[in-house]
Amino acid sequence: MEPLTAVVIILAVLVALLFAAGAGLYRRVRELELATYNGVGVRFAGAAAGPEAQANGLAVPGATTMVIKVNRRCPICDDVLLAAAGMAADLPSDLSFTVLSDDPGFDKSLPGSIRVIKDPAIWRAASVPYSPALLVVDENGVVVFTAPVGSGEALTEIVERAVANRKGVKL
């Protein structure tokens, strides 16, 4: 076999491997994009049956609720909850935090202005594929935004951007 033939064969194999890796990467990016939008448009208020009826407690009439969905096996949720506790007092009156936990024994120390819902059924009804997560629920009980919050800084950034956008300031 000539060296040129061997180089062409090796390059063809490398191109095939790069193509396969690119296709796998594209699939993962699409999955993450779909996961980010999962849950938007779900209605949590009104006359509903099934899981939606169980989740009526997430909506607050006349206000927007930022629901922080945590679970009992979350190693970074304490950082996210500390950030929420620090921001709770500075929120406008029509914005509030609610912590949604799947642990009936949830006992984290949080300010009184943060509602805590400890119901596994409601936790399952808020179907986003990641935890901790931030769900923004409007006054009508419709999820208008979801995002994973992997740190207290990420939560702070999202909430500050939301507050600024409500005031008409673009960040």
Image (spheres, rainbow, N blue to C red):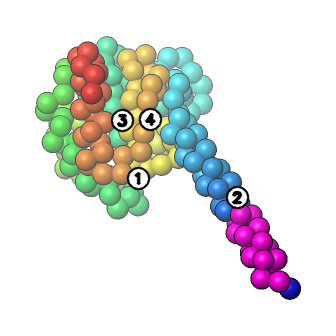
Mark 3 = which residue? 67
Tell me which numbered mark, 1 or 4, is placed earlier along the sequence.
1
Q: Within the image, what quadrant is residue 160 found in?
A: top left
Tell me which numbered mark, 1 or 2, is placed earlier along the sequence.
2
Q: Name the residue rendered at 55%, 41% in the picture.
A: 33
Q: Which residues are magenta?
A: 2-17
Kind of residue at disc 4: Thr
Classify mark 3: helix, strand or loop.
Answer: strand
Residues under labels 3 and 1: Cα distance? 13 Å
Q: Is residue 111 above or below residue 74?
A: above
Relative side of 144 to 49, left or right: left
Mark 2 = which residue? 19
Kind of residue at disc 1: Asn
Tell me, yes or no, whether the highlighted magenta stretch contains residue 4.
yes
Mark number for residue 146?
4
Q: Name the residue rendered at 78%, 77% in the picture.
A: 4
